[in-house]
Amino acid sequence: MNQLFAPFKLAGTTLANRVVMAPMTRSRAPDDVATDTIALYYAQRATAGLIVSEGTPVSREGQGYLFNPGIFTPEQIAGWRLTTQTVHALGSHIFAQLWHVGRVSHTTIQHDGQSPVSASSKTAIGATAFGYDEQGNPGLVAASAPRQLATDEVPRIVQDFADAAENAIAAGFDGVEIHGANGYLFEQFLNPLVNDRTDRYAADTMENRLRFTLEAVDAVIARIGREKVGIRLSPYGRLFDMPHHDEIDATYTALVAALGERRIAYVHVMDQSGFVIGDKDTGMSVSERIHNLLRVFRKSLPETALILAGGLTRERAEQLIADGTIDLAGFGQPFISNPDLVARLQNGWPLTPPDRATYYGGGTQGFVDYAPFLPR
Ligand SMILES: Cc1cc2nc3c(=O)[nH]c(=O)nc-3n(C[C@H](O)[C@H](O)[C@H](O)COP(=O)(O)O)c2cc1C
């Protein structure tokens, strides 16, 4: 039986269907505060069972791009309320994606022009942030050399996540998704070729390697409750200078087992292979490796939902739900240009292709002006 459009119980909350709008940065918050137009954008897409917000920085230090609505000031909390209220009025649910970019930032975005912070002292080669260029104009800039966090500074960042989670609930979000994917701060701790520490947060043992991530998860659970906590992970991801290593399966298997014990709401896996080409050494594609991992994860998540995003179609999503691999299916780019994606998938209506030129920044064009499909 087709389950994609059937309701789903996520940690006690009933979602209208199993279609998830994946988190997408759109960089349309001029003062780093969510606007009425941003509320309209999410309202247009509120037939998704669950919406995950664009990445919302937990602190100024955690910001790598200008014009993204954060969740650490009273104005930012107030700014998000229209979005959450409207999404709820339309019968959907929304989690805030809590984001710290770590080393993928630039001195022009940081307080007093300081260096970005990371697990690592290694610069993310080839990575770009969105800060100010030499003329002082907003633009893409190469990520600055990071400063490795001192051991006693790490708890401060853990607290920033707990504070941001509390702020998200105050702003009306149903929960939070910790952004543990895509080369940002958590991956900088998890990857032993990037994490060059020698302290209790080093990558030398599995316990040390996972310590920061699990401390942040535990602090957020303690503040808002396990049923309001999700996390996003991207095993085999390469974004922002994340080299592959021999212990990817072991690292994510151990991490997800620890998350399963904590009975959080969901684990959201992003398959980056549409963005980055797979491993040539073994001939096994990144997608195949991720699908093997999903089957392992499933076993250690008895009370935690499993979401997959990345290149999904209706057919693929239905198949993966039907064979028990995942519970919920995340769609990213199709939601940009098809605000009524759920109806289009359900009815087999044609999909409008997105305009990549308007993904990031700018005004209403390519943001809130995609029309719903009108059947004749
Ligand atoms: C414009 C754009 C912005 C994105 N921003 C984020 C983000 O803020 N956080 C995140 O975890 N993923 C982000 N992603 C990745 C998407 O969540 C999604 O995983 C990816 O687009 C693959 O799914 P798709 O093939 O359905 O588009 C972004 C993707 C796009 C296209």
Image (cartoon, rainbow, N blue to C red):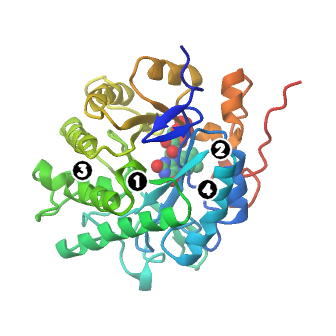
Q: Earlier in the sequence, mark 4 or mark 1?
A: 4
How far from the left and from the top, in percent, is residue 290? 34, 30
Q: Is residue 32 visible?
A: no
Q: Nearer the viewer, mark 4 or mark 2?
A: 2
Q: Are marks 3 and 2 in contact (CB under 8 Å)?
A: no
Is the C-beta of the residue carrying label 4 under 8 Å from the nearest atom of ligand 1?
yes
Residue indicated by mark 3: 191
**In-image side of 200 versus 34 (left or right):** left
Q: Earlier in the sequence, mark 4 or mark 3?
A: 4
Q: CA distance from mark 4 to mark 3?
A: 27 Å
Q: What type is the residue that disc 3 sits on?
A: Asn
The quadrant the C terminus occupies is top right
Q: Earlier in the sequence, mark 4 or mark 2?
A: 4
Identify the secondary structure beneath mark 3. Answer: loop
Q: Earlier in the sequence, mark 3 or mark 1?
A: 1
Q: What type is the residue that disc 2 sits on?
A: Gly
Q: CA distance from mark 3 to mark 1?
A: 15 Å
Q: What type is the residue that disc 4 sits on?
A: Arg
Residue indicated by mark 1: 179
How far from the left and from the top, in percent, is residue 217? 30, 56
Residue density around tag 2, few if under 14, some if 14–19, many if 20 or more, within 10 Å: some
